[in-house]
Image (cartoon, coloured by chain):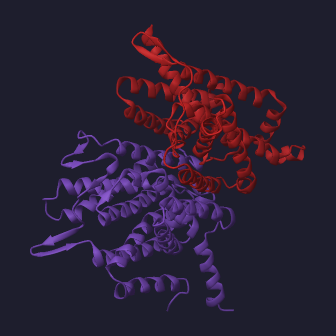
Amino acid sequence: MIILFNLFYQFGDALSFLLLAAIGLAVIFGMMKIINLAHGEFITIGAYGTVVSAKILKLPLPIAMAVGVLVTVIFGYILERIIIRHLYGRPLDSVVATWGISLIVSQSFLVIFGPSFEGLQTPLSNFQLGAYSYSQYRLLLILISISILILLYILFLKSNFGTLARATIENPKIASTLGVKVDKVYTVTFCIGSALAGLTGAIYAPTMTIVPSIGQAFIVSAFVTVVTAGASPFIGLIPAASFLSLIQTSVTFYYHATIGVLALLFSVILIIRFLPKGFSGLLIKLKK
Amino acid sequence: MLKKNNIFTISVFIVLLIIPILFDDFYINNISYFMIWTFISLGLALIWGMGGILSFGQTAFFGLAGYSFAIISINFSDIYAVGIWSPILALAITAIFGAIVGYFLFYGGIYDVFIGIVTLAITLVLETFMAQTAGPEWTVGNARLNGFNGMQGMPLIGIKIGEYKFDLQGIGQYYFIVFLAMFLLWLLYKIKKSNFGLILLASKEDRTRVESLGHNVKKIQMITFSLSALLAGVSGILYTNWGGYITPSSMGLIASAMPVIWVAASGKNDFFSVFFGCILLVYISQTLAVNGAQYAIILMGLILVIVTRYFPEGIILMLKKLLTNKFLSKK
């Protein structure tokens, strides 16, 4: 029983990490076919926003997290207005430009805040089960990641904005002739993606060492999850993240963490070799 | 008779050949260092400019070649002419690895931004893997991998015949790199004009159409990818030889952004512009790095954003075209 719970805890922890790392990237990629290489730096901004407002402005943690998310959204909005919107329809160029942004942001953080910043304590306490000790906060993270997915699902499938957004993905030109403000849909989508990245940074900030390269801890996980999710990340995200975290957890359980990461990458390479359209492609095929 | 397109190339190489007469060893070594990076950039220009395939993981091949060279030459330092065959063997390993990665990418049907992400993931995983090899259990034969501090103390490229000994360093290294760059630029122009190059260029425009004409596009892309890995490997080996060390951070996120910046800013469609622009940009970031490396990286990031936003063709290529039109075109 305890071993089962332990496995569930490890699996849930890895799963929520992959989901939260990838979700912002997946929204932007799924809607706009743009891979935001500065995604990791958006997470960094969310984390620093939270830590700075909690430590220097002495705000309580939940409000500090909201500030972190808000700062990231503002940054994403400005970026979309100045640069990203000029690169729609040039996917490779948008990747290259966001990479430049990523370098600028991470190095600026290094200049402004120095190589490391005083971190926060993990909120909530630990509890004991058998020989192991578990963090309540990490259990909360699992719940948060699931509720975010449900909220996004409602937003994109049930709300008015969702209908406009799906019409825009399907065919931007026809959507705009029907009166959809395609530009606005893109801007809002980019802001939602930024908010999700900022949220990831904000809620993981109390569990990590705050360094300017904090976003890099997420970026590889985010990329591999989105890649294995395939062309429609909304459908493929959950199966891809579950599958990858299952592999990572079980290999880490039997060997050690580095081998777990290597196994993760190796399985990604195999998946894209045999399922080039990722898990979403597989699901769509099965449905037909 | 000179073709007008070649005037820039020839004048730059004449200047490069004269430089050792005018400057002392310190500058010659620095300029060698700048030129070492041109090979990885040329490889990226080949796959990105000609093939339309953007790889973010060229540094994986750079690091792989550097580490293979270090491991092989440390282990077999007693065997005759190790300084000749160890770099060649390391290049072969890199090219084969490039072909394997290329096979998975192109035969797996991965295209566009996904290629960038997969290649970036490969280089980051290699970095993570090498960075944790600090412990004594991570040795290959006699060579300690040394984790984050990287490997040192490998024998130089070179050969010893009887009493006579030639090591690749100083002015010899400088001329070797200049001639190698000349040869490779010539070779790349030949490839561009060949059937192979034309099919590659056409596949950038419309892959399906070229395939329906009966060409094996996947195979051509795989070979090109392997060639570009080979060129990145040349940089990796020369870098390891130049500084006498190779570290995991040469495969990290910042390091892998650099070739993309140099190539994008110079003009990815023209090999000469990439060669010249790369030297110039490495020089600029090296000079700035004296005042703090992070400022140099911020500037490089800015250059990348501004170039993709306003000069998608590349600055050096744009200037070259401007000069050609102004002075060399016959009305």
Residue at image point 45% right, 46% down: B124
Q: Quadrant location of the C terminus of chain A? A: top right
Q: Quadrant of residue B62?
A: bottom left
Res. B38 visible in picture? yes
State the residue in front, B243 or B290: B290
Work out whether B111 lies above or below A131.
Answer: below
State the residue in front, B150 or B49: B150
Q: Is residue B220 left or right of residue B208?
A: left
Q: Position of residue A136 (x, y in %)?
A: 54, 18
**Which residue sits furthest top?**
A1
Chain A, chosen colour in render: red
State the residue in front, A42 or B78: A42
Residue at image point 40% right, 75% down: B31
Q: Position of residue A155 (x, y in %)?
A: 77, 29
Q: Which chain is purple?
A: B
Q: Position of residue B70 (x, y in %)?
A: 26, 56
